[in-house]
Image (spheres, rainbow, N blue to C red):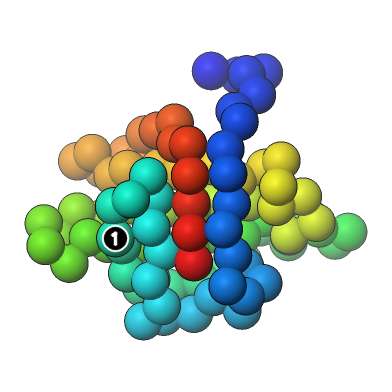
Amino acid sequence: MVGEEQSFTIKASKPLAKVKKGDHIKVDGKPLEVDAHYVLIDHGATKEMTIELFDPKTDKDYQLRYFSDQIDTSLEFYELAEIIYNKKPFQKIEW
């Protein structure tokens, strides 16, 4: 919901900006594979970034979205349902 803060834990093995295709990210223990990492919107002072993910077992698609200068407070997780990505809450993310 708009305006709601979400609390989550990040366990990073490298900076998020260095995550690339073929890397693995776990969201609440669910192993996902990175398909792409790109700039969604360049706002000048910051960039809105998207990491395209998929579950190799089910072939379901997901996204992580964040602002490049606010990773700890802006990270959001989405699951593709038909043609729309729906925001999903999460507790822990690892890469």
Q: Nearer the viewer, residue 78 or 13?
A: 13
Q: Residue furthest right?
A: 45
Residue at x-position 32% and y-position 69%:
33
- Does any portion of residue 85 appear in the rendered image? yes
Q: Nearer the viewer, residue 83 or 4?
A: 4
Q: Report the residue marked by disc 1.
A: 31
Q: Measuring from the top left, give residue 41's x and y in whole percent.
A: 66, 57
Q: Residue at x 49, y 66 (%)?
A: 95
Q: Residue at x 57, y 38 (%)?
A: 8
**58 in relation to 80, above or below:** below
Question: How packed is label 1: few (under 14 Cα within 10 Å), some, or many (20 or more)?
Answer: some
**Location of residue 1 with respect to 17 vertically, above or below:** above
Q: How many marks?
A: 1
Percent of width and height locating residue 81: 23, 39
Residue 80 image-quadrant placement = top left
Left or right of 62 on screen, residue 5: right
- The type of residue carrying mark 1 is Pro
Can you see residue 40? Answer: no
The image quadrant of residue 76 is top right
Q: Secondary structure at mark 1?
A: strand
Horizontally, residue 18 falls left or right of residue 27, namely right
Hey, which quadrant is residue 31 in on the image? bottom left
Q: Residue furthest left?
A: 58
Picture coordinates of residue 47 (x, y %)? 73, 60
Please state if 58 lies on the left or on the right of 61 as rendered. left
Q: Please tell me which residue is depicted at 17% across the width and 67% down the height of the picture.
A: 56
Q: Position of residue 79 (x, y in %)?
A: 32, 43
